[in-house]
Image: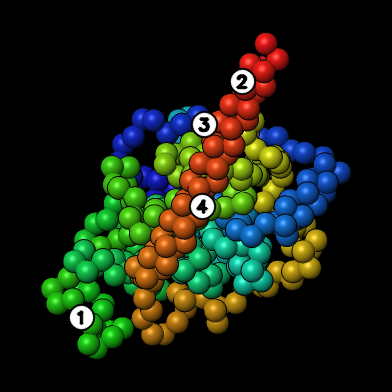
Amino acid sequence: MSCNYAEGLSAYENKGILGVPENFDSEEVVNQKCKQLANLIKDSKHVVFHTGAGLSTSAGIPDFRGPKGVWTLEEKGEKPTFNTSFDEAKPTKSHMALKALVEHGYVQYIVSQNIDGLHLKSGLDRKYLAELHGNIFIEQCQKCRRQFIRKTAVETVGQKLLGRSCRSVDVSQNRSCRGGVLQDNVLDWEHDLPERDLDMAFMNSTLADVNITLGTTLQIIPSGNLPLKNLKHGGKLVICNLQPTKHDKKAHINISSYIDTILEKVCKRLGIEIPEYSEDRDPTKLTNISEWTLPQEYVKQLDKKFKEHQKTLANNSNKQLITKKLIKKRKRSESTEFK
């Protein structure tokens, strides 16, 4: 249960602004903005989506800061009136739309704050996904740090030991870490974000022509600041959320509508059919144990591209600086001649 996940976290007072009223754009405005967003995606070379709890509400999983969010109700001494177990929850139309956008080459990366495992269940390839706060369907070896997919959600949070040995020998007979113990993969407040996932999220967000946020108020740091990383290089920010965020004024487009509605309209304009969820492509339903470790080679490949990009930006900046100095020098020279 998502409220059980919240209850399992350590006490933490600074949970952000809670219960802000939701706003809804008119259908006409939503259609106009979705057309604009679809064109922006089509014209971009590097698109990154940032997903928050609002992506999963239509799967029956409550958000945290919405009018009926877990923490909003907690402040009133209440609990959510609707809920579903993580085991029963299925990927939404939005999760499946994102998978399709990735597979058709329109989206290069997804950064998720969600621990519900619905991106995993959708069949999205690990190399396109950063999970900054963990995944309740993943167990990780405390020693070798390899990750393995579970059939059911873990019952603990906060990277607690599960009392079982590393599963590396089950995946590859010649790659056992010998002595490793499994722990849950879900972060608590005091934990550092996973290094590889954070590196991939940071570099992709910086490289992006456009960062698009879905269902997040962008209050948790550093996750909430990642979509802004491309702005100083001329990139664009798009915010899709029913509640206002502190970064709304920085956005190229703000859309206040249900995420399922937005992505359905965007996919239709891009000519992409959204697939139905299938248990056959859900790794949590597989008989064999599957690995979910993000390979270091992906990080190295992107790091090379990232450094080349930074070098190009630096060269362009130096050229612009030299040009400005030459223009100033010429203006001073012309002023002196006239005197």
Label ID, residue 43:
none
Quick one: 216 or 298, which is closer to the camera?
A: 298
Looking at the image, residue 186 sits to the left or right of residue 302; the answer is left
Q: Residues within 10 Å of mark 4 (few under 14, many from 20)?
A: few
| Residue carrying label 2 | 332
Q: State the image coordinates of residue 186 (x, y, percent, origin top left).
A: 35, 55
Going by the numbered disc 1, the residue's amino acid type is Ser
Going by the numbered disc 3, the residue's amino acid type is Leu
Which mark lies nearer to you, 4 or 1?
4
| Residue carrying label 3 | 18
Q: Are marks 3 and 4 in contact (CB under 8 Å)?
A: no
Going by the numbered disc 2, the residue's amino acid type is Arg
Q: Residue furthest bottom?
A: 173
Question: Is residue 96 in view?
Answer: no
Looking at marks 4 and 1 on the same chain, the residue that comes earlier in the sequence is marked by: 1
Which type of secondary structure does the marked residue at label 3 adopt? Answer: loop
How is the model colour-coded?
rainbow
Which mark lies nearer to you, 1 or 3?
1
Q: CA distance from mark 4 to mark 1?
A: 42 Å
Which mark lies nearer to you, 2 or 1?
2
Q: CA distance from mark 1 to mark 3?
A: 46 Å
Which image quadrant: the N terminus?
Answer: bottom left
- The image shows a total of numbered marks equal to 4
Which type of secondary structure does the marked residue at label 1 adopt? Answer: loop
Q: Is residue 33 above or below residue 267?
A: above
Q: In which quadrant of the rendered view does residue 134 lie?
A: bottom left
Question: Is residue 211 in view?
Answer: yes
Looking at marks 3 and 4 on the same chain, the residue that comes earlier in the sequence is marked by: 3
Looking at the image, residue 6 sits to the left or right of residue 245; the answer is left
Q: CA distance from mark 2 to mark 1?
A: 71 Å
Q: Residue furthest right?
A: 28
